[in-house]
């Protein structure tokens, strides 16, 4: 009997569903970076431990947000039930509690000014593992049988008492084996988790890359005029909108918009305005050619980079989105090791940073690198804790001049430090020795 009970315990544990990649665990906080109302914010959805129960939502501001507050609406996709509230964007926000009645897929609608974003997420609650039932159930049964065996032995013959004691020992054995083996097995999915992906749903090798169409509205914006950069994502095999983007580095998508000469730079996070559609409002001060690079990742697919270029026509000349140039001989200039980078070899780039740097997009700093014709873009992270200096390591793919922008966040703004890097190739470096 003991062997049978042990085998049953192991079979129950082995049937626990594995956790899929990118699944958010129950109780974990969710973060969505958004560019809304002309500012960078991060929406924080705190993990909840029970339903019905409160869902706490806060809006962390990295730049001043126009307007007194941001309107919130949480809707259950399964039954349509909605709750509403407001949140004030601040560097240290107060959290608004909205009551949710069930687990599963939900949508959070953000409204600021005349801009609206709809963020999909799941309310997850840990249901406990089958091992918990076996552990506590086995110990409870063992305790009952042990007491029963003692009473039986005291009042009757020892034979039945020995049988009860043996079954009690079996219960303790099952509980002990579960305690030993459970940490080595994947946890069961929480309540509200997405259905398990099957080969019939996802082909071998994962989903294909999304077909991305990046365009502006209007098609040729004028200098100084507000325009919308729109990204439409379609599944090439079905023709349907792609609405299964994975949150990576705290955003559904990272979009880098630069002018050909590098004087204009924006690192923004578009709003999901409809299934398969992302939008962000921008304003460029000067006419000319501009590049847009969108970093995104589809679930069960992988990261991809969608690129396009567009023209800004003549109009009212301004300075929207432009960044000040940094002279290489100023104190703000970065330190490169080696001083002349070699294509294909690691280069360390170090910049001074003021006190009070705080994490943004989960990192202490970001470095964006683009070649002159816009055909290449690199996005590198400073992986250390915020401090007086930021360090990045990057291997430039080929020789030439690169435009670069280092970014970090302080208490009330995001700082962007532009500079250029001239990269040589291996032959030229070795020939000059």
Image: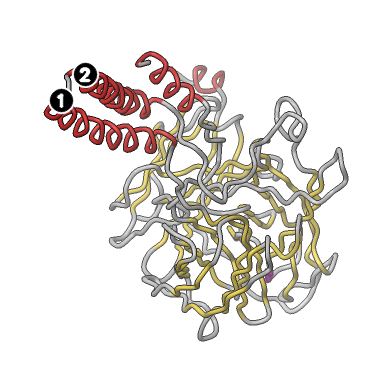
In the displayed structure image, the side of residue 297 where residue 65 appears, left or right: left
The residue lying at 57 percent from left, 51 percent from top is 192
The numbered disc on residue 162 is 2
Q: Earlier in the sequence, mark 2 or mark 1?
A: 1
Tell me what residue is drawn at x 66 percent, y 57 percent.
257
Residue 137 vs residue 390, the one in the foreground: 137
* Boundaries of the magenta span: 281-285
Q: Main secondary structure of the magenta part?
A: strand
Quadrant in which the N terminus appears: top left
> Residue 153, which numbered label?
1
Q: Are marks 2 and 1 in contact (CB under 8 Å)?
A: yes
Residue 312 in percent (x, y) is at: 78, 65
Residue that appears at 45% across and 75% down:
96
Q: Nearer the viewer, residue 79 or 149?
A: 149
Residue 317 vs residue 95, the one in the foreground: 95
Q: Is residue 174 above or below residue 401?
A: above
**Label 1 neighbourhood size at 10 Å, few (<14), some (14-19), many (20+)?**
some
Using the rendered image of the protein, determine whether residue 62 is visible from the camera's viewpoint.
no
Left or right: where does residue 284 sit relative to residue 149? right
Residue occupying the far top of the picture: 3
Pointer 2: residues within 10 angstroms few (<14), some, or many (20+)? some
Could you say whether the residue bearing mark 1 is in a helix, strand or loop?
helix
- Dot 2 falls on a residue whose secondary structure is helix
């Amino acid at each position: 009997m003991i062997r049978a009970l042990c085998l049953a315990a192991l079979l129950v544990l082995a049937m626990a569903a594995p956790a899929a990649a990118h699944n958010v665990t129950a109780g974990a906080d969710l973060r969505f970076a958004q560019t809304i109302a002309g500012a960078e914010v991060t929406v924080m959805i705190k993990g909840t431990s029970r339903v019905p129960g409160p869902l706490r939502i806060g809006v962390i501001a990295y730049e001043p947000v126009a307007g007194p507050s941001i309107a919130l609406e949480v809707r259950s996709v399964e039954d349509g039930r909605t709750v509403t509230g407001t949140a004030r964007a601040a560097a240290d926000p107060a959290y608004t509690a909205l009551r949710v009645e069930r687990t599963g897929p939900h949508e959070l609608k953000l409204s600021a000014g005349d801009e609206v974003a709809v963020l999909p997420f799941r309310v997850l609650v840990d249901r406990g593992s089958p091992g918990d039932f076996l552990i506590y159930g086995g110990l409870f049964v063992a305790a009952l049988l042990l007491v029963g065996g003692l009473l039986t032995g005291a009042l009757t013959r020892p034979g039945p008492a020995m049988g009860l004691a043996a079954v009690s020992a079996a219960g303790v054995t099952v509980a002990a084996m579960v305690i030993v083996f459970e940490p080595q097995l994947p946890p069961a999915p929480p309540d509200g988790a997405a259905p398990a992906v099957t080969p019939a749903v996802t082909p071998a090798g994962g989903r294909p890359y999304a077909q991305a169409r990046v365009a502006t509205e209007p098609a040729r914006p004028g200098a100084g005029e507000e325009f919308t950069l729109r990204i439409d994502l379609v599944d090439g095999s079905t023709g349907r909108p792609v609405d299964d983007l994975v949150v990576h580095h705290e955003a559904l998508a990272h979009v880098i918009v630069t002018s050909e000469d590098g004087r204009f730079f924006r690192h923004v996070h578009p709003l999901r305005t409809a299934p398969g559609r992302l939008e962000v409002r921008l304003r460029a001060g000067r006419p000319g050619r501009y590049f847009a690079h969108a970093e995104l990742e589809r679930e069960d697919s992988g990261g991809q980079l969608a690129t396009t270029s567009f023209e800004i026509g003549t109009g009212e000349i301004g300075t929207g989105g432009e960044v000040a140039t940094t002279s290489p001989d100023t104190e703000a200039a970065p330190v490169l090791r080696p001083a002349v980078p070699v294509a294909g070899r690691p280069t360390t780039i170090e910049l001074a940073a003021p006190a009070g740097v705080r994490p943004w997009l989960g990192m202490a700093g970001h470095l964006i690198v683009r070649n002159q014709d816009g055909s290449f873009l690199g996005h590198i992270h400073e992986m250390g804790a915020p401090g007086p200096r930021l360090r990045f390591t990057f291997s430039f793919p080929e020789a030439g001049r690169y435009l670069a922008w280092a970014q970090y966040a302080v208490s009330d703004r995001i700082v962007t430090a532009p500079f250029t890097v001239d990269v040589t190739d291996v032959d030229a470096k070795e020939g000059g020795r």
